[in-house]
Image (spheres, rainbow, N blue to C red):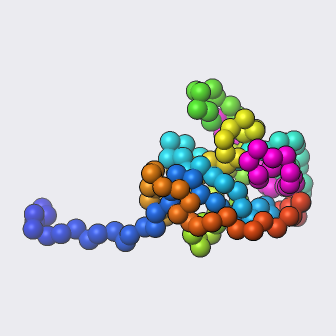
Amino acid sequence: MSHPDRKKPRPATKPSIGWREWVRLPELGVETIKVKVDTGARTSSLHAFGLKEAERGGKPFVSFMIHPEQRRSSPTVQVELPLLSRRRVRDSGGKAELRPVVETMVELLGQRWPIEVTLTRRDAMGFRMLLGRQAIRGRFTVDPGRSFLGGKRAKAKRIVSRKKGP
């Protein structure tokens, strides 16, 4: 039985992020992409098109293209990554969709870590990427009234093709 006067140790303070942030996807060659931090979404999601699945060395891969700039069709970044799985995801309208899942590194506030990302067409959406709960759990607290606590947008380098694997 715990004594009521004993204080529980306080967890270390986590850095705060806003409801929208600039992040890097270094393995994809994306220096900056504006993300919506979506605590209502379990998994992160990235705008992707031209998806093609194939096997290389007996392992499944997915190749796709992304437009990291909102409301722009350039630059186009070509990517090929190992396919982790396919996951049934419900969009904001409640419609279920089976999406490919890949893993990539994300960078925000000087931290770099791997995240799982589902791939889907997001051209009609306001953000090309959603950063979901799994990606930020245990790393940050979210201040829904603020934006870009991670700083200003970094200058973008134009890299047009990234492949990962054998």
**Residue positioned 70% across, 47% down in the render:** 128
Location of residue 3 (image quadrant) = bottom left
Please, is residue 108 above or below residue 78 in the view?
Answer: below
Does 80 appear in magenta? yes
**Nearer to me, 115 or 35:** 35
**Residue positioned 22% across, 68% down in the render:** 8
Q: Quadrant of the C terminus?
A: bottom right
Q: Is residue 158 visible?
A: yes
Q: Is residue 59 visible?
A: no
Residue 127: x and y in percent read 67, 45
Q: Quadrant of the N terminus?
A: bottom left
Q: Is residue 54 left or right of residue 9?
A: right
Residue 60: x and y in percent read 82, 49
Please, is residue 2 above or below residue 82 in the view?
Answer: below
**Nearer to me, 101 or 127:** 127
Magenta segment boundaries in residue numbering: 67-88
Q: How many marks?
A: 0
Residue 92: x and y in percent read 58, 32
**Nearer to me, 136 or 84:** 136
Does 120 appear in magenta? no
Q: Is residue 130 left or right of residue 83?
A: left
**Residue positioned 86% across, 54% down in the render:** 75
Q: Is residue 139 left or right of residue 93?
A: left
Q: Is residue 46 left or right of residue 50?
A: left
**Residue positioned 64% across, 28% down in the render:** 96
